[in-house]
Structure formats: C-alpha cells, structure tokens
Amino acid sequence: MTNTWVDLKNADVILVDGSNCAENHPASMTWINKAKDERGAKLIVVDPRFTRTASQADLFVAIRSGTDIPFFGGMMKYLIDNQLIQKEYVLHYTNAANLIDPGFKGPANLDGLFSGFVDDDGDGFGKYDQGTWKYQTDPQGNPLRDETLKNPQCVFQILRRHYARYTLKTVSDITGCPQDKLEAAYKLYATTGARNKSGTILYAMGQTQHTVGSQNVRCMAMIQLLLGNVGLPGGGVNALRGESNVQGSTDQGVLAHLVPGYIGIPRAGDHPTLAAYNEKETPKTSYWSNKPKFFVSLLKAWWGDHATAENQFAYDYLPKVESPAKHYWMALFEDMYAGKIQGLWAMGQNPAVSGPNARLEREALKKLKWMVVQELFDTETCSFWRAPGVKPADVKTEVFILPAADAMEKEGSIVTSGRLIQWRTKVADPPGIALPDHQILNLIALKLKALYAAAPGPFADPIVHLNWDYGKELSVEKVAQELNGYATAVIKDPQGNILANKGDLFKTFAMLQADGSTACGCWIYGGYFAPADDGAGKIMPASKRRGQKDPGGLGLYPFWGFAWPANRRIIYNRASADPNGKPWSEDKKLIWWDEAQKKWTGYDIPDFVPTRAPSDPGGKDPFIMRVDGRGGLFASLSDGPLPEHYEPVETPVTKNPFSSRLHNPAIQVWKTDQGKSIGDNLGKTDKFPIVATTYRVCEHWQAGGMSRWLGWLTECHPQMFVEMSKELAAEKGIRNGDRVKVSSARGEITMAAVVTGRFKPFKMENKTIHQIGMPWHFGWGGLATGDVANDLTPHVGDANTTIPEYKAFLVDIKKA
Amino acid sequence: MARKAMLIDESKCTACRGCQVACKQWNELTGWEYSKTVNTGSYENPPNLTPQTWTRIRFNEYESRQGFRWLFLKEGCMHCGEAACADVCPTKALKKQADGRVTVEPDLCNGCGYCSQFCPFGIPRLEMAGGVIMSKAKASKCTFCQDRTDNGLSPSCVKTCPAQALFWGDRGQMIAAGKKRVETLKTRGFTEANLYGEAAVGGLGRLYVLIEKPETYGLPADPQYPAVAMMWQNIVQPLGKIAIGGTVLGTFLAWLIIRRNIKMEEVE
Amino acid sequence: MNGQIQEAGHVFQIRWIPKYTFVERLLHWVNTAIFIPLVVTGLVLYLDALKPLAQGDAGQWMRLVHRLVAILFIAVPVIYGILQPRRLWMHLKEFAFEKEDLGWLKNAFGYYVWGKHDAMPPQGRFNTGEKINAVVMIISWILFVVSGLIMWYGKGIVSAELFRWMVVLHDLTMILAVCMLIVHLFLAVAHPLMWAALVSMRFGVTSATYAAEHHAKWYYGPKRAMELYEAKKKNQRHSA
C-alpha cells in the first residue's frame, strides 16, 4: 500500500476492485466503517459476484472477470471528457505534460499493438522493443513538456486519444454491466478529484491474477494520479496483501528477479562485475541513484569481513540468474516437469493445491529427485506421492518433512500491507520436534558450512565465508540488527565528527555507504530495529513500539511499530501539498513546508528531502523513486506504457471491441504436452462456454494447509463448492446442493453447487455469458476435503510478473 | 444492578464467522469432528444451533426494493427479560442473573429439556449421550460467556468481531446506540431499518440493528413469553400443590371425624 | 378391641368368599409398584424441598428411572390387553357408570363420614367410588402415556407449543392421579368401613357379610339387592 490500513478512515470514497476485503481482510471493515460513519464516505464495490464486501457497498458494480481495463479505461475517458481531473496536481506531479517520442504509436493506430512489437515465431505472442516509448528530451536529457497540455504528443493528449475508444456503450457491452451503473460509479468516484476530497482504491488478486494484471494495477495508479489522490490521507493505491507476511517476504526479495530491498539480482552476462552492475542498474536521478550503497551494504551483511573493496565486496560469491530472470513459478514447474530440476524446498507452501494447472504441477513434483517440505500439517504437497489415485511405488522422489512452528510459536516481525513492521513475541511452544523456520534454516546453514569447510570442492567460499553468526539457537534479534543496518567501522562526517561507532544500528538508510563501512540486510528496513522513542519516553527497537500518540488524528500512529521506508506512513506525501508547499486543503493536510524553519513538517515523516524547499530544484517532484520525479501516467511495462484491454487467454468472447488483437501479445504461453491428458491445454468457448474464477473465503486460508485441519473452521466450510447463478442452474437442471462436475481443458472436478442470486448472467449485445466461481482452498487432506480448484486453471500469466491467470478461464458444468 | 445487553449491528456484520469460532474457542466446544457438516448449497453451517454451536451466522439472500441484499444474522440465546427457560427449569440450572444474563450451570442440569421447548425462539439445545433410552442430556446455549462477563470482560464474540459490529454494555446505552444507528441507516436509504428486542419478552438482552424487517431475517416479528408457561408456573403448579396438600389435609381431617363416628365393632 | 370382643362374648366368625382373581390382584400390585416410583421420581421436579434430588447426576438418575419404569407402565396394560383382550374388556365394562351410581354420589358423604349405612343404595363388585377410582386411573394412564411419550420423543417432531401443553397436561394428570391416590390410600388403609378391601386385594377373598353390606348387587344379584334395599327403606320410614 502507498497508504495504511487505518488511513482508510480518511477516505471520502472507497473503491474496491479485485478485492473482497470484508472476506479476506475482515479488520479492514473497521476503518471503512469509520470512514462511512464519521465522514459520510461511500463504498463502491466492483466484482463479478456480490461478495460479503458488496453487502456493505453503497454501489455494487458487476463486471465480467477480466474486464477491469475497460472499466477503468471508461472511467479515465469520463474523467477527461467531463474535466473532473485534479488539474493542478496532474500538471505538476505527473508526466501528463511530457512530450513523447513521435515514433510512438498506440493500439488505436496499430490495431491493438504498441510500436516496437516483435513476434519471432508468428504465433501472436512476442516482445516489445521499447525504443519509441520515451520522452522527447533537451540536450541535457530533461524531458520536454507542454504545460498547456494541448500538444498532440504530450502524454495527456496521448492518454485522451488512447481511451477515446472506451465509450460507455463499448465498456458496457464488454463488461456486461449496464451503462447507468458504470456512469454512477464513475460519477461517484470522480468526486474525489476535488481538492478537499480523497479516494482510495483497494485491490488484491482480483486485479493482479490476470494476463493483464500489471496493467490493471497501472489503471488504478493512473486514475489516482488524475484525481490527485496519491500521497494524501484517505488516498493512494492500496494493494491488500494476501498473506500475513507476504509483504515481508517480497521486501526480502523472495522472488526470482530480486535480492532484498527490491534490488534486481545480478544477471549472468549482463553484469560481469560489480562496477558493471552498478553502472547498468543505477539511474542518474531519483532516490535509486543511491542503489550502489544499498547493494554493497547487502553484500557486506552477507559476507562480512570477507567482502572487501579488493574483491568487489564478494560480488563473485553471489549467484547470478539468467538474463532475463525467468524462473518464476510456472517456469520452475515447467522445468521440473521436464526433469530439469533435482530438488525442491517448499517452506509453508502447498503447490499441489495452489499451483495453476495443478495436475501438471503435481506430475512435475514426481520428477524431482528429492523434496523438502517445511509444514505444520501433512498437506497435499507433503503427501503428493500418495495422493488418491497415485501409487507410492511409482514415485521416486525422496520426501523429507520438517515439522515447523506456526506464527504464534516463534518470535519475530511481520510486515502488514501498509509496510508497517510490528515485532511479535512467542506465546506458545511448538509441539513435538517442530522448530521455527528460522531455526531450521539456521541448522541447515551451520551444517552446510561445516560440510563445505571439511570438503570444499571447487568453490566453497560463498558458503564457508558466509557471515552466519546468529548462534546455535538462532537469535532473531541478531538477524533483525543485520536487516536494520549497522556500521562495520567508525563513520565520520567530512568535519571529522563521529556519526556512528562500529556496530551502531542505523536509524535510517540514509547512513548507508558503498565503501564497505556499512552493512545492511535490507535497506528499506533501515531503522526498524534501531532504538527509538515510543512517544511516551520509553526507548526500544522501533518495530517493538506500541505508542498510542496520533498527531493530527489521521490514524498514522507514528510511534507504533515502524513503517518502511524511514517510518513514512503515507508515501509520496509531498504530493499532499500543492507546488508551493501548502496542503491542497485543510481537510487533507498531512505535511507542509515550514518557511520559518526551512523544512517540511506535519503529521507524517516527509517522503522527501526534508530541507528541500518547493522552490528548489526538484522541490515540486513528489515521486522520488522515479527518474523524473513525476507520477507516470505514461510508464513502460513489458506489455505497453498504457493499459489496453485484452481478453483473458481463455475467453468466451471472439472479438475484442477495442482492436482485433484478442490477447495480451507480450505474455509467455507454455505449450508443453498440448493435446495430452495432462498438459498446457487451452480451452475454447465451443466446449467450455462458461467463465470461471477462483477466490477465497474468510474461513479458510490459502491452499488450506492451516485451516482444513481445524474442526472449527472446517465446520463452517466443510466441502469444496462452486457458486453459480440461478439462471445457469436452471439451464443445467442443477438444484442448490447438488453434486456437480466442473471441467476445463486441463481437468475435471466434482463439488457441491451453491445456486445463488449473487451471480447474475452478463448480458452482452449479442449473447449472455455465464460466470461461476469457486474457492481454491480444498484438497484431499485434513478434515475439510474436496477436489482441487487449480486442476482447472491454466499455465498462463501476466506479461510482467507471470502471476498466473487464476481469475478468468473457461469451463463447463454439469450435474454429477 | 444495571442490566447488561449485547448490541449486534447487522448493518456492519460481514458474516466472517469470527464470532462463531471465538465462541467455540472460549467455551471449548467442538467443531466438525462433532457436527460433520456438509455443504448443502449455502455458506451457512452448521445448519442449526447445536449443543456445540451456541452462536451461528444465518445467511439470507433478499431482493429488496433498493436492490439485492445479502442479510446476515448472528443468532443465539436472546437472554430475555422474562426468561421462560429459567422459569420452567426445575433444577435452577438456568438462572436469570441480576444483570439480565441467563446463565447455565451444566452440573445442575438433569436434561429434562423443558427449556428447549418453552423458549419462544427455540434456542437451548440438549447435548445427548448414551442413546435414546439411557440418555443423559445437558442443556446448552449462549451464556454471554458467563465466566468472562462475571469478571467484567465482554463476551468472546464481542472481543473478536473485526468489523466492530458487536457491542456489550449497559442495556440502556446499547438501546440508545442502536436507535442512533437506525436513524443513521434511515438517512442512508435503509427505510426498513429497525432495532429489534427493545421491549419484546420483557426486553431482550440480545438487541439487533436490522436493515430489513425482522421477518425477512427469519426472526419472529412479535415474540411472546409463552402463555402456557405463565399458566403452568403461576396457576397450575401452585394450585396443584394446594390441591394435593388440601387433599392430604382434608383426608386427615375427615379421618379424625370418621373415627369418632364409625366404630370398628359396628362394622360389618 | 380385644376387651370388647371378650365382653361381647360371641364368636367372631367370618365366612370368606372369593372376590378378586390372581390376575386382578397381580395387576393391582404391579401397577402400584410401577406407579409409586413414577410419582416419586416425578415429584422431585415438582416440590422445592426435593430439588437437590432433581439436579445434576441425581436428576439424570431420576429421569432414567422414570423412563425405565414408564416403559413398564405402558407395557403392562398393553401386554395384558394383548394376552387377555376379552378379560380386559370385561373389566372395563365393570367400571362403566349407570344411572344408579348417582345414588352413591348423593349418599357418599353421609355414608363415609357419618356412617349412615342404610341410605346407601346397593353397589356392585366395584362400588361407584371404586369405579371412579378406576376410571380416573385409566384416564390418567392414557393422559400420562400420551403426554409422556410426547415429552420423551416429541422434541423437534411436534411443535414447541404442543410440547408445552403436554408438559402441563402431565402435571395436571399427576395432580389428579395423586389426589386420587391419597384418597385411595386413606380408604384402603385407614377407613373403618372399608376394612375388607385391602384384605381382598391381597388375598382375593372378602367377608360375606361385608359383601352383603357393601356390594349387595354383586352378592345378592341386582334384583334381590334392590328388593332388600327398598324393604329397608320402607322399614325406616315406618319406624320414623
């Protein structure tokens, strides 16, 4: 989130799209209700299905799965056509005025493509050369701008032309939502464009788990920029993370292309040396220009005294990935399926249930030589080798199960969606021989180091020299100190004053250096474990604080825990003040320029150089992580600089109304074993006419490993089920409670039918499209058993992140 | 002592079932191992209150004039102001406390089951063990977490609710808050919004802010203290004791007279 | 008593005649053995003084005993009816009320309390009072069984309102039956005039003079008994 959970109470309109927050983040309703009760806020819920969140909505808008870009595109057209944008904000804080290379062309002109598309094998999918997707610049490299926003090549005009096709009629037809409903939603949300209003957009997997997922999110960012909502209380672009510490895990770089702190992992070939890496990956402007400091400090944290200026700070010890990094989830399993991967270490992960095309992924597991699973219960992944229908003698994988402690049984920190790091204590002992994950990894690391020290082989240095001194019984506090960042030597300022002694914990990442004098396991966490005041005079590590003071009453609670970066609660908060440093309105004041003290002050830590005046260079550029300091209405992703509607890979529609290109051209499409019973098969609407989506229920958790073994939760939702409209049920002769079979090109599963008025058929001009939905929590293990929903989902994903398209695919349904 | 009550704001409830599970956790009740629920086409489970399920969310889809609504109701013992269950309980296992809670002492319960049938809402459930002839039974129902509320804490469900839809406190304050909420809802277009339980059956200890009429939620519109209970407890039983006592007394008196009038020697 | 007999000086001889068969007596005492525990286990719910016995484990036992004995309560007459339907029917007919029973009602108080023998019209093998007792017992049996079975098995099957009425009915029936039982016990055990009743129910025989006095219609036959009765009444009128 750019904002925080509690900050939701400051919103005037809350737009929920691609999230069922009342279901999956129930505590969020406290703040949404506060907004409704205390400031008369309105809640808009956009979803194919009337959810538990929709039950709280002032306005419920039903759109077919996979049509969010038309919805948002239509909104952008509405805002532009009716002059409802926050003009001053857009002009100064976004790149609306920037001029784009004349060679750039968009889908309106290129029939669904952006300029630079290369399709080597002619299958309709390929890559973009982004050469024309750039600003026109002056000789110094500064972007050329037209502040009247009239130049046809300025971003604003390109935007206007791009979304001109997204008329109410077209959007209504492709989404299946009546025009008046769409217009009501646009009108209501547009009210947040006023200077004294702010609107927040909440989203989750409903937006991201599509082949256009990243572009869905781009839409929301663009709308928030157009309405001047980013950086304000009650505003922002707010991702509701799907796991209690997934924010923490992404912060730690647990993704194929990152190291901790959202720094790209070096790629073999592209980055032969540290200097090459720094040169290539460090922008000249924006706060990322400090990247070498973060990266070197990271290497220093990992290899300690063995990382010196002489050996490029142990750069050669760090494994490199291929270029581009590609071993995201599906690629991993495709390689596994092809027998290319020897072993898998699954920590609290249940791919047998949660992976797309799960039948294929379970087959892939059988190809492993060995697998280690760290788990609480005997999940489907633990037991894939003796799943119903599988003969254990046929599976050669050696499986090790390490019983793990659950969240309450260990100490440590967790990061919320709002980037808030809160330290938690252990309240119970784990049962039997179960150990916390950190201790399991500690024991493994210590053993590996010993083994390699005894028999080094060709290149054992990266392991033997690994800085690993957390104790035999791992001290979580020691790890926290490393993540926080500390001085490895005395640090002095140019005048010779001591800024930090060796071992001192840093209060901010601004102390990090690229010369080896600092170590930091995760630069954005800088300060989270350093001693801090809790507002009442008690000093303790920042993330342990539970201070109740709330200056300004906005619910920021700056003395409670630690929000990265640098305890800034609402990021890009420079944008909450106008170009002169005065809040856009008294109602939304957050930080402001204090002319007397010559610094930014207010209720939040400024996400800005505190002493940089509005009149200084860069004093009006709130988006400090972007090269030009301005919000990107036009911003390049691998599938385009502007969101354009493409249908999901499995779509019930044969024509895309916005162009003749049906699918996102920049995605990767797997084709393994197509035509076989298990394979990357894709279905068409003639055999599979119904749109399906998958989702979660409040009472179960993810792939069910934590909830299906518990009697109280199982009792609420004991079995797998599918929800469908009364109309579809009548067509198929299905009664409420009947057993039904749902099939896709990848599998067939059986479950109970929930016939409900919460799904209604989507009426297009020429046909009616039915949509059904099912939870993906179930598997054969535990008390609450059921078929695996992901047996149906396809092995296709977003063009940028490869997140699988779990949210829109094609099925058929019949009585069992 | 001021009467305590629970206010359930069904305009805020999102049916997360946190309350349903928190109740089970605090009161050490069992879940699926006991009830073996199945999905019969609804999110609602278990399908009824049971001896191991003292509160439960009901789901109801309703087409109101203002659009589709998904209505939720947290059902459980109403803790009536005039508690028929406590009145008919022959062992005082069910007791009406001074603060209005109707508590349960399972040790005293002999399983007669009168409470379950005299309750105007049909709430108390009997835990059966041992088959139909040998059965031992115990009455069970929501007690407003009597061990918590005895010690100044709120019931477990109230503490858990993540949507802050549940409140516990002085009944007068709960009613005032409920009425205020109803007024707010009316200004938002919920024309049928109402506060349920203010006066019925001596005033309920469980008050609801509803956004539709009670009948739409499956609640009785006008619940009554069962007249049969009143007649039984206040008329039949006392008069019966008088009748039996009177018969004994009358017979004794008659005997005193008879022995003077009738001598054994004169009898045939 | 001893002294009086000696003073009276005549030999006190009783001529015994059979009145109740073995089966009749068996049924009576079995019924007693069944009914007393039922009343006692039920009373613990009714009398505050007995409340400790109604609570907890003690109460569960009371319930259990009540139900187990209730099975016998239901079964015994039913089995008898299956095995001896004709005899049962004959018994039931003996308890039928006739116009003459009004006469007993008119004279009962004077007879039983003041000992006024002669006004009482002749009675059959069961006098009107005994018929009332039997009818009350039979009706109670029906009401107990119906209300009791519904209270036992009916939860969730019959409406709550019907259940509530059955509970009240069980109570009312109990009040009626217990009052009847109190009077029955008094008459059987303590009333001088009824001295032979207990003997006859225990041993099956009654005294001839007792029978001639108390059950004239049975002893003499209805016509002769009526004649004797009319004659007695005429004498009384003449003497008065």
Image: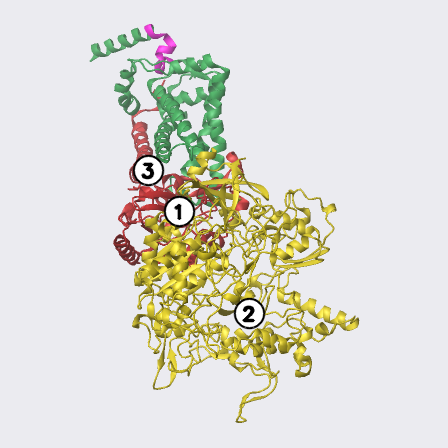
C-alpha gap between disc 2 and disc 3: 79 Å
Coordinates of residue A676 in the picture (x, y in percent): 65, 43
Disc 1 crowd rating (10 Å Cα; few below 14, some 14-19, many 20+) is: many
Above or below A335: residue C115: above
Scheme of image coloration: by chain
The residue carrying mark 1 is: A173
Q: The yellow chain is which one?
A: A
Question: In this view, which residue lies farthest toward the front?
Answer: A102
Chain containing the residue with disc 1: A
Q: Closer to the camera: disc 2 or disc 3?
A: 2
Disc 3 crowd rating (10 Å Cα; few below 14, some 14-19, many 20+) is: some
C-alpha gap between disc 1 and disc 3: 72 Å
Q: Is residue C213 magenta?
A: yes
The residue carrying mark 2 is: A262
The residue carrying mark 3 is: B237
Q: What amino acid is labelled 2 in the image?
A: Tyr
Above or below A341: residue A601: below
Q: For numbered disc 1, what is the local secondary structure?
A: helix
Q: Is residue C212 magenta?
A: yes
Query: Is residue A27 in sight in this rendering?
Result: no
Disc 2 crowd rating (10 Å Cα; few below 14, some 14-19, many 20+) is: some
Q: Which chain is green?
A: C
Q: Give the range drawn in magenta.
A: C211-223
Residue in front for this viewpoint, A688 or A124: A124
Q: Is residue A127 left or right of residue B172?
A: right
Q: Closer to the camera: disc 2 or disc 1?
A: 1
Residue in front for this viewpoint, C76 or A172: A172
